[in-house]
Amino acid sequence: MNNNSNNNGASPRKNHFWDILSGRQLTILGVCITIVIVCVGACTMTLSSLFGAGDEEGAKSVELADRDGSDVSGHRYKFRDREQRSEGSTRKDTVVVNDPMEGDPYEELDELIGLEAVKEEVRSLANFVKVQQMRKQKGLKTPKMSYHLVFTGSPGTGKTTVARIVARIYKDLGILQKGHLVETDRSGLVGQYVGQTAPRVNAVCDSAQGGVLFIDEAYALTQSDASADYGAEAVATLLKRMEDDRDKLVVIVAGYPKEMKKFIETNPGLQSRFNKYINFPDYTAQELFDIFRLYLRKNEYTITGEGAAYLKAALEETVKNKTKNFGNARYVRNVFEKAIQHQANRITKMRKVSDDELAELTLDDVQKALRETVP
């Protein structure tokens, strides 16, 4: 019998790698493995934030709009899947890229409800450009002209819509190559930390090259009281790009009249580049009612006589008591959206629904919508 065998007849125990290491060596090895795992995880997260997260954020912040757009003046209305067009006008996406407007821009302009003075200003601007181009072709002197514009007025008065029309007119006149519109505001231009603002402004200007950059509530760029605010840097960077890309980029700034006047006066560079103002007046009660009826027609809805009468009277009272923040056509659009929602809730409870009922808004639908909508 083999003397090396144990009493149970078990085979001799083999030495493994772990058996030749002491307890201290095992501890050191475990710590090293843990450090390697942590480092690999950290590197993976860093790469993901640099490449993956950046792409995701860009996809969220820059979106393509519907071709016909969400028109706050009531023309060519169509719902948008966009939170910044919701009630209260809270913008969730800070940069919006709109494709060039299709069709005849002058017809689009004429079909807008109200805004007669605005239409005249836009046509006068286009006529002046045409004549200067004719003079240039004949070898005559032409004055140096700035195509940048200041749109003043309350929310919901059609400023963005007219900016899209101007972009298309500029394209047809040969001033711009593409004629698209890029919408943004302070949040799309000003960073929170050192080194963020200039790259943001440059990126937005790059996306707007060949078209129009529309900056809503532009006065907010210089209104912050924070000690570490970079609005002035955004303005300086914007002015440099306007100079460097003067043949490729047109900028339209918009906001309340007094605030915009003060904003332009804060910087000599702004004064020299923005010398053309177009004012957008608030809509009358009749114009707001006409906009609501246009929403009905464009979306194949109707309204009962008593519903229409109640709505018209309510709009007259609202306009009479409006505040500075009155939403104009934006308010009417919100009323329309809530009315069709209440109509849908009502119809789903009916056993049989006729074609007329499927399209009709009632007095009750309108009353509920008005109660829920803040002017």
Image: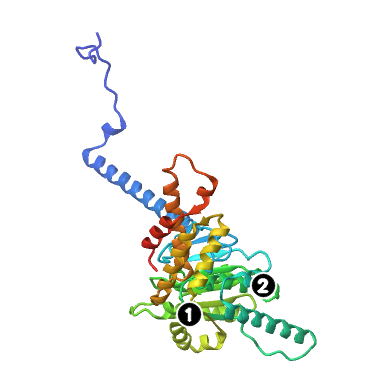
Residue 211 shown left or right of residue 22 in the figure: right
Q: Amino acid at mark 1?
A: Val
Secondary structure of the residue carrying numbered label 1: helix
- Which residue corresponds to the image point at 43% horizontal and 83% vertical from the top-left? 259
| Residue projecting furthest to the front | 306
In percent of width and height, residue 165 lies at 61, 71
Q: What residue is disc 2 on?
A: 106
Q: What residue is disc 1 on?
A: 235
- Which residue corresponds to the image point at 30% horizontal and 29% vertical from the top-left? 16
- Which residue corresponds to the image point at 36% horizontal and 62% vertical from the top-left? 371
Q: Does 351 appear above or below 178?
A: above
- Quadrant (top left/top right/bottom left/bottom right) for the N terminus: top left
Observer-side mark, 2 or 1, equals 2
Circle number at residue 323? none
Q: Amino acid at mark 2?
A: Tyr
Q: Quadrant of residue 339?
A: bottom left
In percent of width and height, residue 335 lies at 44, 62
Query: How many marks do you count on the picture?
Result: 2
